[in-house]
Amino acid sequence: MTDERLRIRVTAPDHWRERTVELAPDTPVGQLKKDMLPLLLDDPEIDPDGYYVEYFEKEVLDESSTLGDLGVPDRGVVLLRPYDLDHPPPFKG
């Protein structure tokens, strides 16, 4: 375990919001989404299941992947986008 930290920009482009945070490379992207959505959208009751994580213009399908697994560099950008008609949530039936 190292003390390495990544300074990354987390954005919610559909809401015109962003924050720069320092996170460990072993941070799961699902945890990032859960922690950052309420801060970005100023809504403690926001449901993270209504959003997906995007990195390099692709949805991160396995949210247990870490920032390091994805290869997010220092000063990288991770997006949080809402599911919508053009990008529906995964079927769980």
Image (cartoon, rainbow, N blue to C red):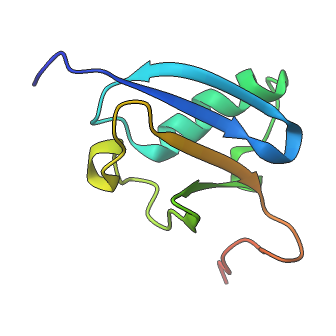
Q: How many marks?
A: 0
* 83 to 69, vertically: above or below: below
Residue drawn at x 34%, y 46% as measured from the top left: 66
The answer to whether residue 52 is left or right of residue 26 is right
The answer to whether residue 5 is left or right of residue 12 is left
Q: Tell me residue 47's x, y (percent).
A: 77, 43
Query: Seen from this angle, which residue lies furthest front?
Result: 75
Residue drawn at x 89%, y 75% as measured from the top left: 85
* 62 to 30, vertically: above or below: below
The answer to whether residue 30 is left or right of residue 81 is left
Residue drawn at x 47%, y 29% as measured from the top left: 8
Q: Tell me residue 34's x, y (percent).
A: 60, 36
Q: Tell me residue 93's x, y (percent).
A: 67, 84
Q: Quadrant of the N terminus?
A: top left
Q: In terms of image quadrants, where is residue 44?
A: top right
Residue drawn at x 51%, y 20% as measured from the top left: 21
Q: Tell me residue 63's x, y (percent).
A: 46, 55
